[in-house]
């Protein structure tokens, strides 16, 4: 059994256990696969985090989840997050995703947003 994450439109992250990764659209409570697609892939070494969902939907169904850089855009309904390692699906936990998300934010911070070392401070 594997675990994946469902990113609810309210911003809540839910852990879901599955036997296989078929019919991900059903796990996100969509009636059909129409419009359900791979939205983005974050890579780190031999690991990938795949985000599935819909790019089109009703205005009141916009997903409010904050996603790591460089992903931008509006997505609708529940999103699905899957981890792959060496092209094979792996279990993913909320803690692992939060760690990855935090590490991406720190790596991609603009130079003026990164913490300065003591030597880099200017004396006034």
Image (cartoon, rainbow, N blue to C red):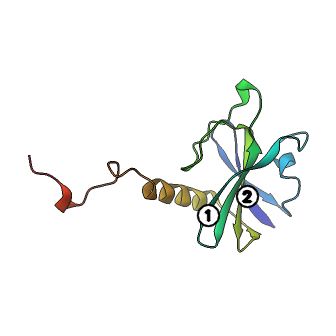
Find residue 37 and report its horizontal and vertical position in percent: 79, 48
Residue nearest the observer in this picture, 97 or 49? 49
Residue 73: quarter of image: top right
Q: Which residue is mark 1?
A: 43
Q: Position of residue 113 (x, y in %)?
A: 35, 48
Q: Earlier in the sequence, mark 1 or mark 2?
A: 2
Instruction: Return the residue at label 2.
Output: 4
The residue sitting at the left extreme is 124
* Image coordinates for residue 35, horizontal then vertical, percent: 83, 41
Question: Residue 86, which numbered label?
Answer: none
Task: Give the spatial CA distance, label 1 vs label 2.
Answer: 17 Å
Q: Residue at 91% x, 41% y: name it.
A: 32
Where residue 7 appears, x then y in whole percent?
Answer: 68, 45
- In this view, the residue in front, 66 or 34, is 34
Secondary structure under tag 1 reads strand
Q: Is residue 87 above or below residue 81?
A: below
- 69 sits left or right of 64 in the view: left
Q: SS class of the residue under badge 2?
A: strand
Left/right placement of residue 50 relative to residue 27 reads left
For the question of whether residue 28 can be seen, the reply is: no
Q: Residues within 10 Å of mark 2 (few under 14, many from 20)?
A: many
Q: Is residue 24 left or right of residue 13?
A: right
Residue 23 visible? The answer is yes
Place residue 4 in its image quadrant.
bottom right
Residue visible at 69% across and 32% down in the picture: 62
Q: Quadrant of residue 29?
A: top right
Location of the N terminus by quadrant is: bottom right
Q: Is residue 21 above or below residue 77?
A: below
């Amino acid at each position: 059994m594997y675990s994946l994450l469902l990113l609810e439109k309210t911003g809540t992250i839910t852990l879901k256990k599955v036997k296989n990764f078929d019919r991900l659209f059903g796990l996100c409570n969509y009636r059909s696969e129409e419009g359900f697609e791979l939205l983005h892939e974050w890579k780190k070494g031999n690991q990938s985090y795949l985000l599935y969902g819909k790019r089109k939907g009703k205005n009141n169904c916009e997903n409010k989840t904050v996603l790591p850089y460089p992903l931008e855009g509006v997505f609708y309904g529940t999103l699905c997050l899957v981890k792959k390692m060496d092209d094979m699906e792996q279990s993913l936990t909320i803690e692992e995703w939060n760690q990855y998300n935090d590490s991406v934010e720190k790596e991609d911070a603009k130079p003026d947003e990164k913490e300065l070392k003591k030597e880099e401070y200017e004396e006034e």
